[in-house]
Amino acid sequence: MPQLEFADYLPQLFWLAVTFALLYLYLAKKALPRVSEVLEERENRVIDDLEQAEKHKKESRSLEETYEKLIATARANAGKVLAESKVKITETIEAKQNKSNQAFASKIQQAEAKIEQARSEAMTEIEVISADACSKIVASLSGIKVSKTRATDAVQHVAKGQD
């Protein structure tokens, strides 16, 4: 085996050094700068991505705050609209109730007037019937004929409470 012969060590070491030096120069001049560029690109991309993520995070916080403000405003507006609607509905109901109450009051007054008229008519009829009955009773008990006007006066006098 040629590797084990001591006479061939020196040329093998020479070529080893030359190959190592060429490989070193190639790596130092060509390969390592490319690797370094790729690493720098990756680092810059990561830094840019982190910056964009932070920017998007700030934007999302800003949008969230805006959203919360809009929600609060919408809730306040909804509360106002609800209160206004409630007031309008209450006013409408009260107006309708007042109108109904007035209509009922009018009907009640008309009914009371009719009742009073019927009562008055009934009292007049009762006076006439009472006067007639009174004159007949007096005529049958005592035999004296009482005039209609006198019997009517007596019934009215008793009806007023003036014995």
Image (cartoon, rainbow, N blue to C red):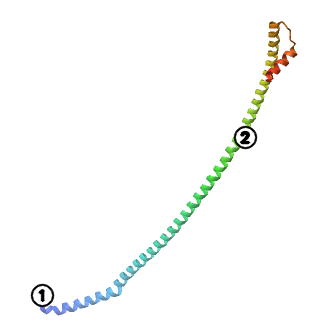
In the displayed structure, does residue 68 sit left or right of residue 158? left
Q: Is residue 105 left or right of residue 52?
A: right
Q: Which residue is at a point 12% across and 91% down the rendered structure image? A: 6
Instruction: Name the residue rendered at 74%, 38% in the picture.
Output: 102
Q: Which element carries disc 2, helix, strand or loop?
A: helix
Q: Residue furthest front?
A: 163
Q: Which residue is mark 2?
A: 99
Locate the N terminus by quadrant.
bottom left
User: Element under label 1?
Assistant: helix
Whole-Å distance between the Cαs marked 1 and 2? 126 Å
Give coordinates of residue 75: x percent, y percent: 57, 57
- Residue placed under numbered mark 1 in the picture: 4
Q: Quadrant of residue 79?
A: bottom right
The x and y percentages for residue 127 are 81, 18
Task: Answer with the quarter of the image where residue 48 lies.
Answer: bottom left
The first of marks 1 and 2 along the sequence is 1
Residue shown at the point (83%, 18%) measured from the top left: 154
Q: Assess disc 1: are there few (<14), some (14-19) or many (≥20) residues with their C-alpha within 10 Å of its C-alpha.
A: few
52, 4: nearer the viewer: 52
What amino acid is labelled 2 in the image? Lys
Indicate the quadrant where residue 150 lies: top right
